[in-house]
Image (tube, rainbow, N blue to C red):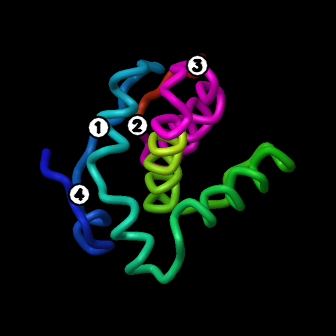
Amino acid sequence: MQLVKTVVKAQVQVFTLTEKFDDQAWRQFARLIDGYAIAQELGFDLMTWGETQETAYRQSGIWHLNILELRLMLFYGFRADYMSGYTYHERDHLVDSLLAALSKATDQPYQRI
């Protein structure tokens, strides 16, 4: 699949979630969009927005985001993990929760860790 850089292309992009948590698969999926470009098109800084969304999730335990926003959060998680040195497990539960939310929103199977 090609990297998409616009809101319109991201919204029509067809994708299949991994059926269970996989370190490499979620990163590949996160990289299907250019989260920086899409966030800029939507009028916000991805990393600042992502931190705000992550804080809200940690307080409520619920993602109040649409499909594109959930995908942006996966991209954010990928970039945050990359910038922190790829620990591979530090953000697993956050990513798992995002994949589960995407599963529910898209009616695709996903087994939580």
- Mark 2 — residue? 108
- Please tell me whether residue 50 belongs to the stretch shown in magenta: no
**Residue at left offset 53%, top offset 71%:** 45
From the image, tell me which residue sits under label 3. Answer: 89
In the displayed structure, 43 sits above or below 108; it is below
Q: Residue furthest right?
A: 59
* Distance between the alpha carbons at the discs numbered 4 and 1: 10 Å
**Amino acid at pointer 4:** Gln
Q: Is residue 16 above or below residue 49?
A: above
Asked whether the residues under the numbered discs 1 and 2 touch, taking CB atoms below 8 Å apart as contact, a structural biologist would say yes
Residue 25 appears left or right of 13? right
Q: CB of mark 1 within 8 Å of CB of mark 3?
A: no
- Which residue position is annotated with label 4? 13
Mark toward the viewer: 3 or 4:
3
* Closest to the observer, 22 or 34: 34
Q: Quadrant of the N terminus?
A: top left
SS under mark 4: loop
Question: Residue tagged by mark 1?
Answer: 16
Name the residue located 58 percent from the left edge and 19 percent from the top edge: 89
Q: CA distance from mark 3 to mark 2?
A: 24 Å
At label 1, the amino acid type is Thr
Question: Considering only order in the chain, which callout, 3 or 1, is on the residue closer to the N terminus?
Answer: 1
**CA separation, marks 2 and 4?**
15 Å
Residues at badges 2 and 4 in contact (C-beta under 8 Å)? Answer: no
Which contiguous range is marked in magenta?
81-107
Determine the image quadrant of residue 17.
Answer: top left
Q: Position of residue 48 (x, y in %)?
A: 62, 65
Along the polypeptide, which appears first: circle 3 or circle 4?
4
Q: Residue at x 34, y 69 (%)?
A: 37
Q: Earlier in the sequence, mark 1 or mark 2?
A: 1
Q: Position of residue 55 (x, y in %)?
A: 77, 52
